[in-house]
Image (tube, grey):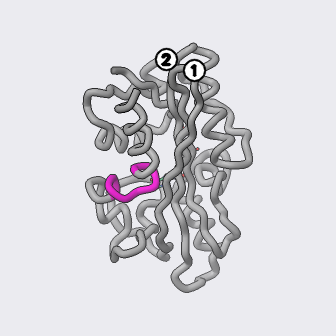
Amino acid sequence: MKIIFATHNQNKVEELKQIVPSKYSLLSLNDIGCIKEIKETGSTLEENAQIKADYVRFKYGLDCFSDDSGLEIDALGGAPGVYSARYAGDQKNNDANIEKIWKELKGIKNPRAIFRSVIYVHLNQKKICFQGKVEGNIIYEKLGLEGFGYDPIFIPKGYKKTFAELGNTTKNKISHRALAIIQLVKLLERT
Ligand code: ITT
């Protein structure tokens, strides 16, 4: 069965391919020829996830799901949150985003953070939303080479290494996106 994942982020696609059973074949926006950037004008992860899934549902008439995710840091009032991809500007520069977080944290010790993922699904004329989150803390150096985005500066609670050091096998068991997508897989299995 083919499922459209309304994303242009290849890292998200690769992650989910490792989690979703192989009988479901994931197609990204590029795979269906949708190269246009979908403007994320919402002020919450839920709103942006819906914007991306609605765009595909109504432009292409296809069932699909989207993911809007972000890093919420307590000491920054939940920032970068919904602005995680563009925290340091529209160029979506990951290094600049991390530098900006470090600057704003001003050396606060062990800043607590949450990674949150909202998955919005269009399936058989129904709309469903799932959420996954993982707690952890931010560190002031980049450690590890796997993953993407803020993975090298995020240590999940109960671990001593960053997501980027733990690698995809561990990340995909405990991450915000994994916890959200498992709920979608359960729904697909029941459908
Ligand atoms: P799409 O909208 O096309 O899906 P995007 O990268 O713009 O791709 P988001 O709008 O959801 O995705 O932005 C999420 C940003 O949050 C992402 O670019 C990363 O910087 C960060 N992020 C989300 N999940 C992450 C993860 O698992 N590890 C590290 N950083 C993550």
Q: Position of residue 182 (x, y in %)?
A: 39, 45
Judge: label 1 CB < 8 Å from ligand 1.
Answer: no
Q: Crowdedness of circle 1 by 10 Å Cα count: few (<14), some, many (20+)?
A: few
Q: Residue at x 66, y 33 (%)?
A: 51
**Which image quarter holds the N terminus?**
top left
Residue drawn at x 37%, y 21% as measured from the top left: 2
145 in relation to 42, above or below: below
Q: Is mark 2 within 8 Å of ligand 1?
A: no
Tell me residue 141's x, y (percent): 45, 74
Seen in the picture, residue 143 relative to 6 is either above or below; the reply is below
Farthest residue to the front: give it: 190
Write down the residue under mark 2: 33
- Does 104 sit left or right of 22 as displayed? right
Which region of the structure is painted magenta? 171-178
- Callout 2: SS: loop
Q: Amino acid at mark 1?
A: Gln
Q: Which residue is mark 1?
A: 125
